[in-house]
Image (cartoon, rainbow, N blue to C red):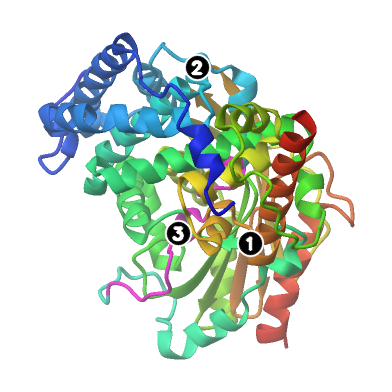
Amino acid sequence: MKGKAGTAESPMCLPAAFAEFYDHAAREVFRYLARALLGDRAAAEDLTQETFTAVVIAARAGRPEALTMPWVMGVARHKLVDHYRRAARDERHLELAWAQSSGSVELDPLDGADPARVLEMMCRLSPEHRLVLILKYVDELAVQEIATTLRRSLHATNSLLSRARRALATSVAEGT
Amino acid sequence: MSTNPVRSAVDLVDAEPSIEFLNALRARLLADSTEADETTAQHASASASETVEEYVALAPSLTRTGPSRRAYKVLMAAAACVAVLAAAVVVRRLNDSQEEGGLRDVDPREALPLGQAAKITADKIGRGWQQVDDFTLADYEKQTAAMIAETPACAQLASVGLAQPTTKSVIVHQDFAKGPVPMFHDVWVFATAEDASRAMDVIAGDVYPTCSLKLFDRLTALNRNITALSTSTRWQAEPVIAPHGDRQVIVGQKIEYTFLVGGASAGAINAYVQVGRAIAFIDPQYVGTVAPNSNVERAITLSTDALKRVFGR
């Protein structure tokens, strides 16, 4: 597959630019993913690799935005959402969870809870509940942004968020 | 959750990457990017097998991800990119200078509103579907040009309104998804029913399916939601679909995906239905049935009904 030199406008004509970007971005991308995956380092490494492979492909396709932090973090979030969706489907929770509706009861029993306990309980939540909590409380996205990311309606996203909060609060309360 | 206990919990996570991982990935990606650069010029003329080979070279060996996980992404690409030669994200008229093709030029000011009126809505496709937007016009144009450079015979499709740029048709493109499952819907509007019929003749021929599948495979690499390359082939033994509209052409598609690790297969039904001076394209994923209540039949019927409301006689 070796051949002629690439086109001049390709960002991949400048490996140094990619290396500089990687050195700047890789640690931050991994941190974001590792936190969002609640410490699953293997999955974080997988998704980091997928994210930067997408950078290579996009840069090679002549997309200059590929070597920017907003773009790479956007790709990382897409990879994260895909990861949780796969996990949800594997557990066959996804369809049921998004089909159910619930009230909008706001529960705040987690205020003052032991963070280690909350983390432990989050790890036991269903993937879609984990994801929506991460997007809301770690990424600090607005509900409308979460809905867009998940390709769900605002109403469905609010319901999902409400259920996730309830599930976490209940599990923490029952576990103490 | 006014004090954000979730964030406090996540702050406990050890999120520091190992130096070994970062260095190994860096080295691999740098090698890949350099190789990709060297092969860019040849990419357009690479054969399908060569393309897969190149992609495999891009795939770091560090992954712990198994094929089963990747297989989920097949759904993302089963229909993705199949806007193919109709691949325009916006409706537009291009190039005033056209080679002689026999078809009349279409007036976009008159035709565009008609095409827009034949759109379908996500809620009518079924529960969970939403309209999305995965690719830019620049992506389509660049890959279409590269595809034509690779297969010059495909350039003739512009003369019948089936490849951009063209003055022979206008197109309205819609991009839907249900979770990871995508589906495209395009409406071409021609100047006359006879012109649309000539375009259908070409779709039913050998050149168009070949070109459309080539473009599909080129676009797969640009899909941000799937890290794979695809190799598509005509599905010669495609299922028999009930007729729709004035005329219908079905192009079955078998897709072999090459992921970072492993691969997977998928199928899609590319349905082209003519009603009057318009042609609708929709590409439901084939999941084993084309029965009256199947996703394939429902999608084609929805598209055809929308076309009939605007272009029916």
What is the magenta range? B76-95
Real-space Cα separation, disc 3 to disc 1, in angstroms: 19 Å
Labels 3 and 1 share a subunit: yes
Q: Can residue B222 be seen in the rendering of this structure?
A: no
Give the chain letter at badge 3: B
Q: Which residue is mark 3?
A: B87
In this rendering, the answer to whether B235 lies above or below B135 is above
Q: Residue at x 57, y 78 (%)?
A: B194
Q: Which residue is mark 1?
A: B130
Q: Which residue is mark 2?
A: A42
Q: Can residue B153 be seen in the rendering of this structure?
A: yes
Q: Amino acid at mark 2?
A: Ala
In this rendering, the answer to whether B143 lies above or below B96 is above
Q: Amino acid at mark 3?
A: Ala
Give the chain letter at badge 1: B
x%, y% of residue A12?
Answer: 18, 33
